Image (spheres, helix red, strand yellow):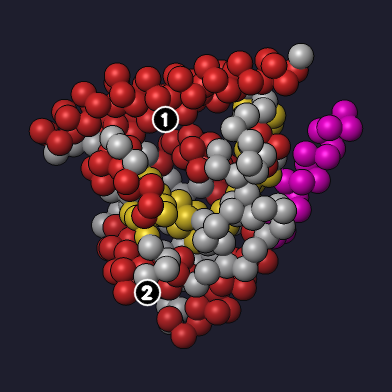
Amino acid sequence: MFTLITAFRSLVAYVFVIGYIVIIGTPALLIALATNTHAHLIALGINCIRIAMGILGIKAEVAGAEYIQHHRSALYTVNHASNVEPPILFAVLRSLTPKLKVVYKAVLRKTPILGRGFDQVGFVPIEREHRERATQAIDRAAASVQSGNSLLMFPEGTRSRTGELLPFKKGAFVLALKAQAPIVPAAIFGAARAMRPGSPLIWPTTVRVHFGPPIETTGLQIAQRDQLTERVRNEVARLLAEAAAADAAATRH
């Protein structure tokens, strides 16, 4: 019975999101293109995410919110184990919008309406398989941060199928060093329960997002990217263990 209810809620959420994008997103995008604005697109996107989370029964518990940098640009580096994580994190960090941008896989740029919307709001597509284009994307992202925006990034480069933290790609840290921007390490735990690999069903659950103190990069050089990568990865690993422990404690009670 629970599986049937989950399947129904998942179907309703899928239909809602698709309908929202087509019926509300299309005219909103046309207005954005005509007026060269985008703040309303982000507000509508966050509204869509929050309603979908409500339909699906997904809740987000946040720890370390005091480390979110409201007064300056920063890079938010987060682990990645599920497709539902990016929208959840964007909703969690909604207080940073419209200056919060996302670095995402360029293949998603081909998605109808969404791809054009991502361009309009200043999200940065990256092709990790194409070295020259990836470098150009990093330069664009660094310029975006220097202009006052913050970035949400997933330095593992792909989803972890086991939940274990994968090696970090160095692009995020080269970007941070070029922009001389602080890095806010973060961990998200529990999203893999919501959407399991190979299944379209999205299960109700509580997702925990833990932020850590910012790691400064001012004065650091590109040659120090390896040390910076290791330091941030170790902090994300610590936060992930902390979030897992908090989740286990909540389950026991």
Q: Earlier in the sequence, mark 1 or mark 2?
A: 1
Residue 64 forms part of the magenta stretch = no
Q: Which mark is residue 46?
A: 1
Query: In front: mark 1 or mark 2?
Result: 2
Could you say where residue 186 lies in the image, as x and y percent from the top left?
59, 52
Q: Is 234 left or right of 247, judged from the image as shown?
A: left
As drawn, which residue projects farthest toward the right? 252
Quarter of the image containing the N terminus?
A: top right
SS class, disc 2: helix
Q: Which mark is residue 140?
A: none
Q: Is 3 left or right of 22, judged from the image as shown?
A: right
Quarter of the image containing the C terminus?
A: top right
Taking the image as drawn, is residue 139 in sight? no
SS class, disc 1: helix
Vertical arrangement, residue 189 with respect to residue 91, above or below: below
Vertical arrangement, residue 25 with respect to residue 108, above or below: above
Q: What residue is rendered at 61% in x and 16% in y?
A: 8
What is the magenta segment's predominant secondary structure? helix
Could you say where residue 47 lies in the image, as x and y percent from the top left?
41, 24
Residue of label 2 = 131
Residue type at the position of mark 1: Ile
> Range of the magenta residues?
237-253
Residue type at the position of mark 2: Arg
Residue 250 forms part of the magenta stretch = yes
Q: What residue is rendered at 52% in x and 17% in y?
A: 12
The Cα–Cα distance between marks 1 and 2, rounded to whole angstroms, is: 32 Å
